[in-house]
Image (cartoon, rainbow, N blue to C red):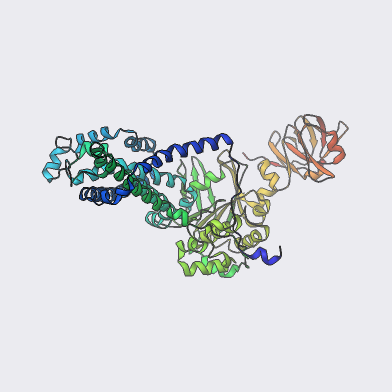
Amino acid sequence: MNATDLESPLRLRRAPVATPVVFTVLGIAAVAYIVGPIIALGLRVPWGRFVEIAARAETREMLIITLAAAAQATVIAVALGVGLAVWLHNLRRGASIVRLLVYVPLAMPPVVAGLALTAAFGRRGLLAPILDALGIQFAFDFSGVVLAHIFVALPFVVVAVDTALRQIDGEILASARGIGLTQWQILGKITAPMTAPAILTGAALAFARSLGEFGTTITFAGSMPGITRTMPLGIYLEREVSTENAYVLSAILIALAIVSLAVAGLPTLVRKTPRQRARELGCLDSARLRELTAPDSAAAVTVSHGDHTTVFPAGTISAIIGENGAGKTTLMNIIAGRVRADVTVDAGGGRVVMLTQRPGLPPTTTALGAVAMVVGREKAAQMLDAAGLADVADARVPTLSGGQAAQVALVRALAARPAVLILDEPLAAVDVASAARWRRFLHATAHDRTTLMVTHNALDVAGLSSFAAVLEGGQVVTAGPTDTLLRTPPTPFVAGLAGLGMLHVTVTSTDEVVCAGTRLRVDTDGLPEGAAALATFRPTAANIVDSDDGLAGKVIAVTATTLADATASVDLGAGVVDVPIDAATADALTPGMSVRCHIPASELKVYAAAS
C-alpha cells in the first residue's frame, strides 16, 4: 500500500461476531415457526383460481374498504402518535404511567377493545348525547371502522417514535437550544430528520396492523357488506362457505402487509454508509474567525447560593477547577440554564452557550449544515474556512473524527456570538497541534466574551485564564486571580495543578510550625500563633531518608515514571506527598511501609489556609 492508497475513500465494514450455537439454533427455530405457517398457507392457495376469486366484486369491495380504512387510520394514528410521543419525551412526571397506558390496546383482547369503544362511542355510549347532537354515528358506518383501526394501530406509532426520541443524545438537543434554535426549529431541523425512519416504521406497522384488524371492528362497527366489511371479516365468513376463497383472500392480505413493511424498510435498505476519507485541516485564521464570531458585548456572571456569591468577571477567561465529582459540570449546567437548582444566576441577559466534551452535532447533517443552523450556509462556510475546517464542510457528522467534530462544535458555538461561552473540556479529543491553535485563538479573543472553562489542564489554567474558581463538594470554596491561586494554592488539587506539594500545618511561633506532630523551623510570614496554615514546596525537593530526620509517613503507592525513575506517594498525615525516587528505592518500597520524608525548610512556603 502506498501513500495514494490512504487518500482514497475506505468502505468500512463491521467485523463479524460469532454467535453462540444455542442462540443460532433458537433463532433458526423462531424464523421457521414464523415463516412455516405462511408457507403452508401458500401451498393451500388455489393459485389456478386466484385471479378469478380476486376479481370478484365482493373481493374488490372488501379490498377497497380495507385499504381506505387502513390508510385513513394510519394517517390519523401517525398524527396523534407523533404528537403523543413528543409530549411524552418532554413530560417530566407521569411519563411511565402514560407509556403503560399506551400499551393497553396491545394487551387488550380485540373483542374487549371493541366493547370499550362501544361503551364510549356507541349508540348508548358515554359520549352518545354529544355524538347524537352532532349527527355522528359510528355503528355500521365506515367511520366506525376507521375509529376501531386507529385504536389498535396508534400504539405502534407511539412506541416506535417514542423509542427513537429517547435514543437521541440529550446533548444534541441541549446544544441546539443553547445556540438559539427555537423549539419548532429543533423539531424541524433535528428531531424530525432523526426520527423520520421511526415514524415511517411506525406508520407501516400501523398500516399492517390495520389491514388485519378483525375483533375490534366487528364488535364496534359491525360487518355490513359494502360499508364495514373488511378483508379479515370476509375471510372469517368465507371459511364457512368456501375454504379456497378464504385462502385467496388471506394471500392477498399477507401480500399487502409484506409490501407495507417492505416500504417501511426501504430507507434502511437503500441507505449507504458514508465512506471515510482522509481530510486535511488547514490553518486557523484567528483574525478572520474573530471578526466573524465577535459578540456585541461580554457579560459578567454572578452566581449566588445562600450567603455565598461568586462573580466571574466580564471579558475574561475564568478557569473552573476541582477534582472529579466536585460539581464543575453541574455548576456550568446551572449557569447555562440546562438544569435548575436553588441557585441564582445573573448573566446580564446575554446569550449563554455551553460546549461539552460531547459535540452535540446532529448526525443527519453535514459539518456545514450543523453550523448553518445558526448563521446560514454562506457565513457557516466562511467560519469553517477561517477555522481551517473547509475540507470537512461537506462531511456527514457521523464520518467526522472525534477531534474534527469537537472543532466543528466549537465553531458552531462561536457562531452563536454568545456573551458567555462555557467550555467543558471541549478540546479533550483534539490533537495537540490543533488544540494549540485553538488555545491561541481563545487567548487572543479573551476580552471579546466571558469564557468559563472547565479544565484539568495546568497549561490551560496558567496560560489562558486570568480568574479561577475552585470547587469542592459542589460549592465554590475560593475564587480569585489565577496567578494568586497558583502561588498560594487553597487545596491540594490546585497545588497539584501548580506542580507543588502541600502540607497542612499549625503556626506555633514566628519561625516555627507543627506538621503532623513534627516541629519545623520555617518563616511563617507573620501569621498569628495557633493559625491554621498551608505549606507548599517543590516535590523534587522531598526525599525519603533512612535517618529519623524528617516527617513520618506511610507509602500509599509506588508508580514508575520511566525505566529508571518512579514516584512514591507518601501519606504524611498532614498531606500526601509524591516523592521522586530511583528504581532501586522503588524496588525496596511497598504500600503500607513506614518511611521518613525530609523536606528542606528553605523549600517550604507558609501562608494562611482559606477559611
Residue 133 rendering spot, x and y as whole percentages = 11, 43
- Residue drawn where x is 22% and y is 36% of the image: 219
Q: Does residue 314 appear in this view?
A: no
**Quarter of the figure with the N terminus:** bottom right
Q: How many marks?
A: 0
Q: Using the image, determine if residue 419 lies above or below residue 305.
A: below
Judge by depth and name the residue closer to the eye, 77 or 43: 43
Residue 213 rendering spot, x and y as whole percentages = 29, 41
45 on left or right of 457: left
Judge by depth and name the residue closer to the eye, 89 or 60: 60
Image quadrant of residue 254? Answer: top left
- Residue drawn where x is 36% and y is 50% of the image: 260
89 on left or right of 584: left
Judge by depth and name the residue closer to the eye, 480 or 392: 392
Residue 546 rendering spot, x and y as whole percentages = 88, 33
- Residue drawn where x is 68% and y is 54% of the image: 459
Q: Using the image, determine if residue 269 lies above or below residue 129.
A: below
- The residue furthest front is 48
Image quadrant of residue 280? Answer: bottom right
Residue 440 rendering spot, x and y as whole percentages = 64, 62
